Image (tube, rainbow, N blue to C red):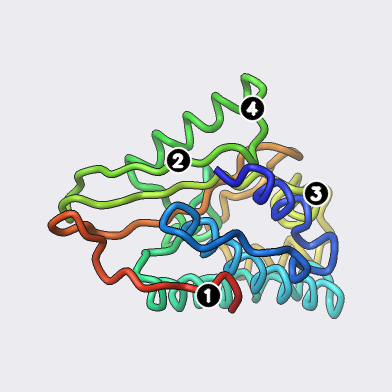
Amino acid sequence: MLDGFLKNLFEGLLLSGGMTAMSPPPLTPETEPDAIILRYQQELSGQLKAAMQAGGPVAAIGICKELAPAIATRLSQETGWQVRRIGTRVRNPELGLPDAWEQERLAEFASRMAAGERPEALGLRATVEDAQGRVERYLRAIPTQAACLACHGDPAAQPEALRAALAHHYPHDGAIGYQLGELRGAFSLKRGIRNGVAESSQPTSPHP
């Protein structure tokens, strides 16, 4: 689903001045999750790029820590989907920890990447039963891009000021040591289904 769309999305992140020039996918029930992800990425990448230009990776830490969860919360309220980013390793144990279903899917994504599949092609939509009842779920892989390595790569390659800032904001940081192209996590969307109808689902524009 939308493989070419996600390819452009991820390859443009932080490297091309944001993704404002991209055409949004036509909004249908099938494309809605990717449209929500695009909104998230457009807003977050724009803020990160501005922070990086103003103060380098240290300045971007606050954007990831404060703004990213705020964007996810707002999109959740606006769309009826619970919007999250999850990681194979996490920076903040209070956010981003995958649940059991997500852990299994991430392991599948990693295996498929190891077998040669391109990460931008890795997405999964499913209806499952969990503690909340019947829910619709959507996962879209997040590969490690070159721009991610400044904060998520080898700590030995990080400037001392950046290491100190990360240690201050994330004393239990585990989201380090990634290699270019490695699976870093996924966008995870979830919403309840009652009597065959998605709960609190609202139309959403792919633009903020």
Question: Which residue corresponds to the image point at 56% horizontal and 25% vertical from the top-left?
Answer: 112
The amino acid sitting under disc 3 is Ala
Q: CA distance from mark 2 to mark 1?
A: 22 Å
Quickly name the residue at label 1: 71
Q: Residues within 10 Å of mark 2 (few under 14, many from 20)?
A: some
The amino acid sitting under disc 4 is Glu
The disc placed on residue 146 is: 3
Asked if marks 2 and 3 touch (Cβ < 8 Å), the reply is no
Up-down relation of residue 31 to residue 166 (above or below): above
Residue in front for this viewpoint, 201 or 92 = 201
Q: Which quadrant, please, contains the N terminus?
A: top right
Q: CA distance from mark 3 to mark 4?
A: 19 Å
Instruction: Estimate the x, y position of residue 61 in percent, counting from the top left.
Output: 68, 70
Q: Which quadrant, please, contains the C terminus?
A: bottom right
Question: Which residue corresponds to the image point at 24% horizontal and 66% vertical from the top-left?
Answer: 199
Q: CA distance from mark 4 to mark 2?
A: 14 Å
Quickly name the residue at label 2: 124
Up-down relation of residue 51 to residue 92 (above or below): below
Quarter of the figure with residue 158: bottom right
The amino acid sitting under disc 2 is Leu
Instruction: Estimate the x, y position of residue 165 in percent, counting from the top left.
Output: 70, 69
Question: Which residue corresponds to the image point at 80% horizontal and 49% vertical from the top-left?
Answer: 146
The disc placed on residue 117 is: 4
Name the residue furthest left.
195
